[in-house]
Image: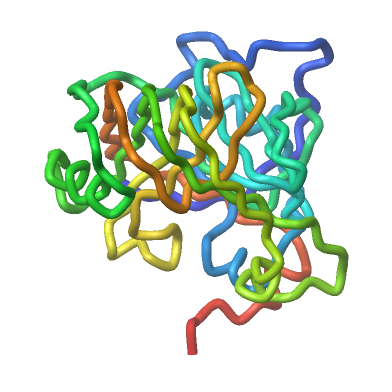
Amino acid sequence: MITALRHPLVALFAAAFLWATSAAAQDRDAVVQYSTLDALKAGLFDGQITYGEMARYGDFGVGTFNGIDGEMLGFGGRFWRIREDGRPEAVTPETETPFAVVTFFDRDRVFALPQGLDFKALAERLTGELPSANTPVAVMIHGRFPKLTVRAPRPKAPPYPTLAEALKDEVVWHLEDQTGTLAGFWFPAWLGGINAPVWHLHFLSDDHSRGGHVLDLTTGEGEVALDPTPRLTIILPESAGFDGADLSGR
């Protein structure tokens, strides 16, 4: 089931937090996404929703920040930002995003992380574990990674370029002997304009010293958990830029 809605701007979280809501309010089998991949590709880098608001819909996810000022990943009820200096920092609830995807993560399918795989081989292995060819899946992997290649974008100011242009000067790090968590999603091809039909993973080291969007890796010992999520809600931006953008792909 897919729904799209306009969000009310609600003030949330007056205190420092673990990002949580009451169990009664949680739909644990839904993905909630703000904006669309096509909108981000078009350079719509300013959003009006905060991570405090997004935390109402999930304790796990990936995304970015206004001006594409960093990569976001969240798990275990905490959200993190990795900026161009490569150092993770905790996200404050009032921080806004132009694009984010969250869910309440459940360990529905768990298996050992195959060792010695690069990113392409890992993606093929994960795809082979999918229970459905048409249902989005959240994935969390904890383990040791002998090699990791990660990136973060450099922040941009208006007038914004397209995402492809903005990423031409991204910062890339080649890391070794890292232990930490990969968090992300897989979306089916028929949702390609909404989100990328690939395994989209972000990394955070256990000591919270390194992270970023994963470009390549080598796997060591670890564990994989998958969470198929049959409901998808898309929150559309309320802005003149979004209302006037041509997202038809023509």
Vertical order, 37 against 47 (above or below): below
Q: Nearer the viewer, residue 135 or 69?
A: 69
Q: Is residue 129 toward the left or the right of residue 238 in the image?
A: left
Q: Where is residue 83 in the image (x, y as percent from the top left)?
A: 74, 43
Q: Quadrant of residue 188?
A: bottom left
Q: Which residue is drawn at 27% across and 26% down?
A: 224
**Colour scheme of the picture:** rainbow
Answer above or below: position of 148 versus 2.
above
Task: Please report the residue visible at 35 percent of the width from the left and 61 percent of the height from the top.
Answer: 191
**In the rendered image of this protein, does residue 127 appear above or below residue 178?**
below
Q: Where is residue 69 in the image (x, y as percent from the top left)?
A: 76, 50
**Along the line of sight, which residue is nearer the eye, 236 or 118?**
118
Q: How many labels does the image show?
A: 0
The x and y percentages for residue 197 are: 34, 59
Determine the residue positioned at 79% across, 36% down: 95
Q: Residue at x 51, y 23 (%)?
A: 75
Q: Is residue 206 left or right of residue 129?
A: right
Query: Is residue 64 rendered to the left or right of residue 220?
Result: right
* 108 over 214 or under it: above or below: above
- Tell me residue 165's x, y (percent): 67, 75
Direction bottom: furthest residue: 250
Q: In which quarter of the image is residue 226?
A: top left
Along the line of sight, the residue nearer the viewer: 59 or 175: 175
